[in-house]
Image (spheres, rainbow, N blue to C red):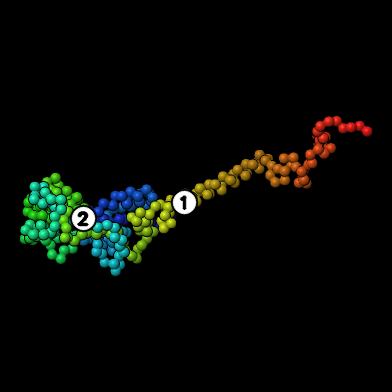
Amino acid sequence: MTGTEAPLSFRLAYVPGVTPAKWVRIWNERLPEIPLTLVQVSAAEATGALREGAADAGFLRLPVDRTDLSAIPLYTETTVVVVPKDHLVAAFEEVSVDDLADELVLHPLDDVLEWERPPGRPAIERPATTADAIELVAAGVGLLIVPQSLARLHHRRDLTYRPITGTPQSRVALSWPEDRTTDQVEDFIGIVRGRTVNSTRGRRSATADSTDKARSADGAKAAGKAKAAGKAQGKPTGSQGGAARGKPAGGRTARRGSGGTKGGGRRGGPRRRS
């Protein structure tokens, strides 16, 4: 790397509720030479962070404008209703939106669910954030419907949640700017899609390539040193080796039993005299 080249890095954005730890761990195992930096953004800021270059890729919630962003849908989240532990809803394993018709249901300004019409009775004022809405649920002001990951993120001992049917669902996707599909983005796509390190579509890390080149160079140097050492010690090579093994300089093997060879007489009994 020259002095003018910037070191490689990868910035990964993620919205609240998404836990990228598994994929980050695999990245660090496969590409330890390229540091991965996590950038937490709100759901509203996610696409802007990608377009403005604040992150190379990100986990966000669909929908996303596909005009300039690519996206790979990963999974769909379960929608739940958050209630106080002593609320009647807590006695059921699952409820529907119709069961909440008479309940005050909070609808925060950063709600990630796309409602045509929120269920229940609306509050006089919408909470600014999901965190604020959670505080109001704990105070007994109303209930809150969110993706399960957000219910877990804002867990409190005095609250619980139950799956709810008849509601929109949040879909999580990996997204990145289409015109900036770099090698690092391709590497991360491979990790998210479960490709192995030996996958034909995967890329080898720079460290692995340089290590292989270094090993090849070291092997060539070692072979050269061994050859030079052999010559210095007078080890026979070529035709000299043939002579050392009992071959004449002409390259023809001496015939066994010839008169010129010691002990060349025929084995067995003595010769008969005439």
Q: How many numbered markers are drawn?
A: 2
Q: Is residue 43 above or below residue 227?
A: below
Kind of residue indicated by mark 2: Thr
Q: Residue furthest right?
A: 274
Q: Residue sitting at 37 percent across and 48 percent down?
A: 29
- Judged from the image, the secondary structure of the residue bearing numbered disc 2 is loop
**Res 203 seen here:** no
**Marks 2 and 1: in contact by CB < 8 Å?**
no
- Measured from the top left, where is residue 36 in percent x and y? 33, 52
Residue 11 lies left or right of residue 269; in this view the side is left
Is residue 53 placed above or below 214 in the rendered structure?
below
**Where does the image place residue 185, in percent across and percent down from the top left?**
35, 58
Q: Earlier in the sequence, mark 1 or mark 2?
A: 2
Mark 2 crowd level (few <14, some 14–19, many ≥20, 10 Å Cα) = some
**CA separation in Å, label 1 and label 2:** 45 Å
Which of 229/83 is in front?
Answer: 83
Residue at 15 percent across and 66 percent down: it is 116
| Residue 198 in view, yes or no | yes
Q: Which residue is mark 2?
A: 78
Where is residue 69 drawn, in percent x and y? 30, 65
The residue at the far top in this view is 270
Q: Residue at x 12, y 59 (%)?
A: 97
Question: What is the quadrant of the N terminus in the image?
Answer: bottom left
Q: Amino acid at mark 1?
A: Ser
Q: Which residue is mark 1?
A: 210
Q: Position of residue 197 (x, y in %)?
A: 40, 52
**Closer to viewer: mark 1 or mark 2:** 2
Label 1 CA crowd tier, 10 Å (few <14, some 14–19, many 20+) = few
